[in-house]
Amino acid sequence: LDFTESDKGIDTLKTSAGDFTADLFIDCTGFKSLLLEEYMCVKHHSYKDILPNNKATVCRIPHDGDPSEVQNFTNGYALGNGWAWNVPLWNRSGAGYVWSDLYQDQEGAEKEFREHIEKVYPHYMPSELRTIDIKNGKHEVAWYKNVVAIGLSYGFLEPLESTGLMTTHENILLLCDTLQRRQGFYSRFEQDSFNYNCDNMIESMKNFVALHYALSQRDDNQYWQDCTNINFDID
C-alpha cells in the first residue's frame, strides 16, 4: 500500500489491485488504522486506565441444531481475570474469554477458559484456541482532511455490550447524513460536527462499559479489586 498526497490529504491509494483516486477515503482497516493513524499520524489515546482488558481468546463450539442449544440470548460469565461469552447460532456457538495480560499470561488464560468450557459445554473441548489483541481507545478525531475512520480504525472499547457494532453502525449513518445534507459538499463545520458526535458517543459508552466492572461486588483477586476501584474522570 502506497499513497500520493495533495493539500486536502490523500490523493491516490496505490495497491496491488490497482490505483484508487477519490475525494474522500473511508479507513476501515481495523486496529491497524492504516490511513488515519499510520499515514495521517492522527494520535491514538488508550483507555487502558479504565478498561484493562486487552485480549480475547475465542473458539467455536459445534452442535447438531438441538433446540436446547440454541437460545435467543447471549450468556456472559465473570471469570477470574475478565469475562466469557457464548453466542448461540443455528449450526454452532461462538465462545470467548476477554481478559487482561496485566493479571495473567496466555497459558493461564487458556487454562481458565478451557475449565469454563468444560462446565458450560461438557460434551466438547476445542483443540485450538485463538487469541486476539484488543486495542481499546480512540483517535483524536475520526475525520481528518479527506480520511474518515469508521469502526475499529477510529476507536474501540471491548466486546462487552457489543458497543463496537453500534458505534460502527451509527457513525456510518452519521457520515451518510452529513454528506447528503448538502449534496456531497462539506466544510470544516461538517467535519467538526462529525468528530464531536463520534467523540461524544465513544466517551459516554466508555464510562457505561467501565461501570459494569466498577459496580461489581467481586473482590476475590487483584483483577476485580482494581476494577472496582477505577478512577472515573467524569465532567
Image (cartoon, helix red, strand yellow):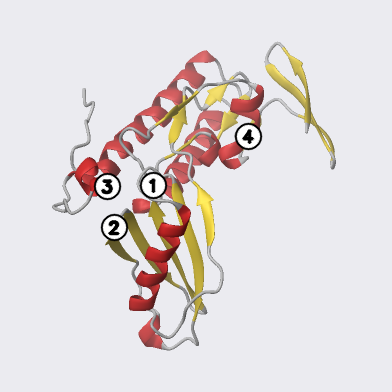
Element assignment for label 2: loop
Q: Percent position (x, y) of residue 81?
A: 32, 53
Residue at image mark 2: 80
Judge the density around disc 3: few (<14), some (14-19), many (≥20) Cα neighbours within 10 Å: some
Q: Which mark is residue 196?
A: none
Where on the picture, by quarter, is residue 183? Answer: top right
Q: What residue type is labelled 2?
A: Gly
Q: Which of 80 and 198 is in front in this view?
A: 80
Give the alpha-carbon distance from disc 1 to disc 2, as whole Å. 10 Å
Among the two numbered marks 2 and 3 on one chain, the one whose residue lies closer to the N terminus: 2
Q: Name the residue under label 1.
A: 100
Residue 208, given in percent of the width and then of the height, sits at: 26, 42
Residue farthest to the left? 217
In the rendered view, would you say 163 is above or below 22? below
* Label 4 to label 2: alpha-carbon separation: 39 Å
How far apart marks 4 and 1 lie (CA) works out to: 31 Å
User: Badges 1 and 3: C-beta atoms under 8 Å apart?
Assistant: yes
SS of the residue under disc 3: helix
